[in-house]
Image (tube, grey):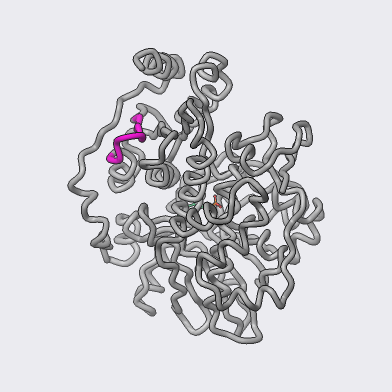
Amino acid sequence: MLYHSLHHQSPPVDFREATIAGQAPDKGLYFPEQLPVHSPAEIETWRGLNKIELGLRLLKPYLGNAMDEKTLSGIIEETLAQPFHLVQITEQIYALELFHGPTLAFKDVGARFMSRCLGYFSRNNDELVTVLVATSGDTGSAVAHGFEGVEGVEVIILYPSGKVSPIQELQLTTCGGNITALEVAGSFDDCQAMVKEAFMDPLLKAAYQLTSANSINVARWLPQQLYYALVWQQWPFDGTIPMVAVPSGNMGNIAAGLLAKHSGLPIDQFIAACNENDTISAYLHTGMHTPRHPVPTLSNAMDVGNPSNLVRIAQMFNQRVEDMALQLQGITITDQDTLATMRNVYQNCGYLLDPHGAVAYAALERSLPPGKPGVFLATAHPVKFPDVVEQATGIRPKLPSHMEHLLERTKQAMHMEASYPAFREWMLSRKKDH
Ligand SMILES: *Cc1c(COP(=O)(O)O)cnc(C)c1O
């Protein structure tokens, strides 16, 4: 399988190269040259497979010859080493819980898969691969845990001081070993700007083999198709297929769902559930995409004003927005509706939602025709957002027992000014020391 850049100015590459590079040299996103197609009869047999075999059927075509089947199967096993419960909330509404991984958010799946792939691809390298990542919370913790202990790879995380939750900070800063956390005296945008500048800096590029771990990387994007196959495996109805609501920010997750559907997975309509930073609804109505400056909301992992994976979705539909709008709709949910949904669902069903899952629940409830069942993806554990959950429901969620060890660990972070020259100086000096 080859991947081409959606800017069409760089040569096609295989999965290995696309994973190592992240983004194409022309700054385009990589996209598979042919999309695999599975027949209905074959898809029917997927129902009875275990998670690892299911993962193999779905992902093997995307890796081509980049990896042997045994290695891939081992990576899939580690990636899916957590439960993925489909939980019934009301007569019509089901949740696929994606938050039982090491950092309690769905990004664990993509981060693990990518880290194992990158570790495998750099196994014979003499030079260390350095993953640079800026985070507002979830991405950094998933990447830190995904890469913890992976040989041949180190991770440097930049996070804004005082702007991540206490649990997220512990997840970011207590791995040690090949994971280094930089606590930046600035905003998430400052962190992101510093990382972006580093990728363009010839001196740093000469000193390091740098790569990024954000959701534009195919190795983080593609394995997310598994969520939708896991929905379908557990779907309790015969003869009716689910509508699926996805809490959306950069739209990597929903783009993976649409891709799986393209390959034959039986899913009805997709709902891009957005907070007030919704740019998709207008795009699907007018065919014009207008990026916006994001505003802060309660579901902050979705505060994105220019979703980078939209170009991948457009490509799947050959840029035909009318076709896209048949399979995808956008719904905007305000913070006020998010809180009301969290409260109502807790009071009426005894189920605690995190703010991201709540946006998707509300969007699904609004779109489901009477009598039709649907699923939303619960992307984060409520304990990651204890203040919002308490504000909405009066309940302060407890850390799951397998996470309590976190509270005993000690934060290790380097302080860093929000200045590129200071960051660059530090990067160069640590290379000299080695
Ligand atoms: C990142 C994130 C999202 C948004 O996912 P995209 O793939 O960027 O659309 C939704 N919910 C949570 C909890 C997240 O961390």
Q: Quadrant of the C terminus?
A: top left
427 or 57, nearer to the observer: 57
Query: Is residue 272 at all visible to an observer of this figure?
Result: yes
Residue farthest left in this picture: 408
Q: Residue at x 46, y 56 (%)?
A: 79
Position of 166 compared to 317: left or right? left
| Residues shaded magenta | 174-182
Membership of 180 in magenta stretch: yes
Specify whether residue 365 is in view.
no
Along the viewing direction, whichever of 310 and 337 lies nearer the viewer: 310
Taking the spot 46% from the left edge, 64% from the top edge, the residue there is 378
Residue 231 location, quadrant: bottom right
**x and y, in percent, of residue 31 in the image:** 70, 46
Residue 289 lies within the magenta run: no
Q: Is residue 39 left or right of residue 183?
A: right
Q: Is residue 137 left or right of residue 209?
A: left
- The image position of residue 5, as x and y in percent, is 73, 39
Q: 272 or 11: which is nearer to us?
A: 11
Q: Quadrant of residue 304?
A: top right
In which image quadrant can residue 164 be found?
A: top left
* Position of residue 67 measured from the top left corner of the image (x, y, whole percent): 59, 48
- Residue situated in front as seen by the camera: 410 or 79: 79
- From the viewer's perspective, is residue 165 above or below residue 74? above
